Amino acid sequence: MGKVVFITGSVRSGKSKLAVEFGEKSSKKIVFLASCAPLDEEMKKRVAKHKQSRPRDWKTIEEPIDAADVITEAKADELVIFDCLTLWISNIMLKFDKEKLINEKIQELFLILSKTKAEVIVVSNEVGWGIVPENKLARQFRDIVGITHQKLAGISDEVYLVTAGIAQKLKESHE
């Protein structure tokens, strides 16, 4: 079976940098699964900067909705870096406005993560440490992300919390 590593933390805390460092140390082929669909110039610049920070020989797949399909195709000799889960959840919430459909997509991802032969690193943002959002959609997003993180941490072999560029290992696999 594959291995699932979950990296979480606040925005700009160093999560993606840690995932890239893990990828650079790996002997596996790297597949970078990017969930961002840049819709404006500022986001396009961010995506370009992220791409420049990764080794050129890595395969990048930009997939804002069907992340599970990409992970399904991954092989045992590959490491998939999925960056980022929070943006993916935002994408599916905007596409599927019914909570049942959103939950089905999340459950599909968990099923694929439990079956994959590849190693998968999932990067995500902690969004629940601030104030309670004033609008329903933002509260729903915060709640879905929080519940998804709990479940993901439960099935992950390793979990890291990154704060100010410092990674703390919260859960370690016992292989």
Image (cartoon, helix red, strand yellow):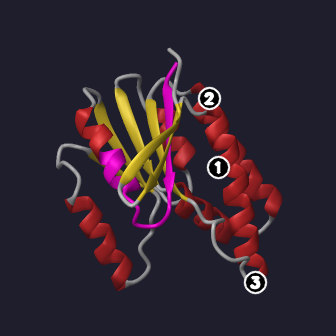
Q: Specify which label sits upstream in the sequence, 2 or 1.
A: 2
Q: Specify which label sits upstream in the sequence, 3 or 2.
A: 2
Q: Residues within 10 Å of mark 2 (few under 14, many from 20)?
A: some
Point out the frontmost of discs 3 and 2. 3
Question: The disc labelled 1 sits on which kind of residue?
Answer: His
Q: Name the residue under label 1.
A: 149
Label 1 residue SS? helix
Where 108 falls versus 84 (above or below)? above
Label 3 residue SS? loop
Where 117 falls versus 101 (above or below)? above
Q: Position of residue 35 (x, y in %)?
A: 47, 59
Q: Where is residue 138 in the image (x, y as percent from the top left)?
A: 70, 76
Question: The disc labelled 2 sits on which kind of residue?
Answer: Ser
Q: Residues within 10 Å of mark 1 (few under 14, many from 20)?
A: many
In reply to whether residue 149 is colored magenta, the answer given is no
The span from disc 3 to disc 1 (Cα, nearest Å) is: 21 Å
- Segment tinted magenta in the rendering: 1-20
In reply to whether residue 6 is colored magenta, the answer given is yes
Label 2 residue SS? helix
Where 28 falls versus 37 (above or below)? above
Asked if the residue under mark 1 is in contact with the one under mark 2, i.e. CB atoms within 8 Å, the reply is: no
Q: Name the residue under label 2.
A: 114
Asked if the residue under mark 2 is in contact with the one under mark 3, i.e. CB atoms within 8 Å, the reply is: no
Residue lying furthest top in this view?
175
Q: Mark 3 points at which residue?
A: 135
Q: Residues within 10 Å of mark 3 (few under 14, many from 20)?
A: few
The front one of 117 and 25 is: 25
